[in-house]
Image (cartoon, helix red, strand yellow):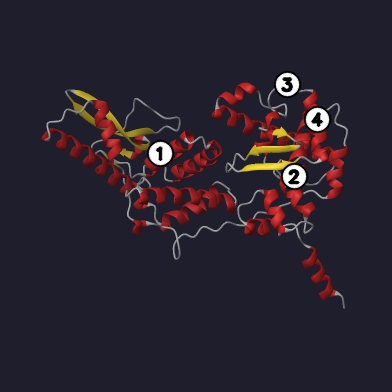
Amino acid sequence: MLYKSNPKKDGTFPLVIRIIRNRKPIYYQIGYSIKPENWDEKKSVVKSNYPNSVRLNHLILKKQTEVSAILLTADQDEVHLSDKQLIRKVRTNNKSSFNAIAEEHLSDLLKLKKYNQHSGENPRVNHFKNFVDNEDISFQHITVPLLKKYMIYLAADKDLSDRSVSNCLIVIRTLFNKAINEGLVESKHYPFGPGKIQIKISESRKVGLNAEELKLIEEVDLTYHKAQLHARNIWLTSFYLAGIRISDVINLKWKDIYDGRLNYIMGKNGKVVSLKIPNKANVIIEYYRKERISSYVFPYLKDEYGKDAKVLNSKTRSFNSLINKQLNKLAIALKIDKKMSMHISRHSFGQIAGDKIAPQLLQKLYRHSDLKTTIGYQSNFIHKDMDGALSEVLNF
């Protein structure tokens, strides 16, 4: 039935299974909502003119069968289930659904304090839920044709880039693998791999600042622009330290600096890093040492944030956005025709380094696990040989 006591903003009502026990009704939502005009009250089915009506009516029948089987088994075994126990058992019985596995996966990320990953994957899960109209779809129904339509939906309706579309597919692949590993769906239904959906990570265009632009940023007087001053200083610190990630820079503490070195644990992968602090970076650090107001080097985070890892992560992300806005204002003021962000400090280091440093040393500076990653990354910024070869060909 339609649960008309709980209307949604879009004019739809949740589809529920009503169970009468001891003359009292309890309701189980099946994860789908429709408008009254699409519902056949007498037959208790979705009208045929509604999109996906056949699949939705099949889902309703399946849910009714599941509930009936649970009640019948309980009666045969003379087990008294409370209302809460019944609903919990129905939900557990449907644990092979996409929504159930996705919810468990996202919950596990929070338990493991992988807040950045959770923030990235949660909206990607919601993209798929919206695509299937919030239907609690099972994994065997996530087919190659369905995923191809999903890719078109993401690119055309959501206007996502190729890389963002790939990221959304990676989440579904992760959840599908989880379901297979837990024995909730057979591997024969797996829609990824040769001849099926193959996820290709498109190369992103990496643009860094050149030496002249870096000098402009270093030399500009920001005495009367404190917000831009702090943004510039934290950006330069990241650049001077081979593009240390923004979350790690914001979270630097005074205890991480000793013996002229920066010693910290990377937030992304837990690696221990020790870097000699260059003179240019030390000048900035000493500037903040004089104005020290907390255990953090830069004046963004407060000590109280560190008491809750989730709050700390949220504040770090918020300040990252704030810093990027100030960096863009600075770029406009300096007439730098490139989009400024904290991440571009890493690209800028790569561009200035070019082929001056051996790949093995760059690998250590970048904190890459694999040398191939370093070589692939640095290839974005080394053009000398290719440019020279092109000139040789055209020199006639």
Tell me the amino acid under the disc marked 4: Glu
Query: Residue under circle 3?
Result: 293
Q: Which residue is mark 2?
A: 339
Q: Nearer the viewer, mark 2 or mark 1?
A: 1
Q: Amino acid at mark 3?
A: Ile
| Mark 4: secondary structure | helix
| N-term-proximal mark, 2 vs 1 | 1
Q: Amino acid at mark 2?
A: Lys
Rounded to the nearest angstrom, the CA distance separating label 1 from label 4 is: 46 Å
Residue 165 relative to residue 57: left or right: right
Name the secondary structure under disc 2.
loop
Please give the residue where the numbered disc 4 appears in the rendered image. 286
Provide the residue designation for mark 1: 104
Mark 1 vs mark 3: in front: 3
Q: Between 265 and 109, which is closer to the camera in this rendering? A: 265
- Which numbered disc flags the more N-terminal residue, 1 or 3? 1
Residue 128 point in image, percent of width and height: 46, 45
- Judge whether 173 appears above or below 81 on screen: below
Amino acid on which the number 1 mark rests in the picture: Glu
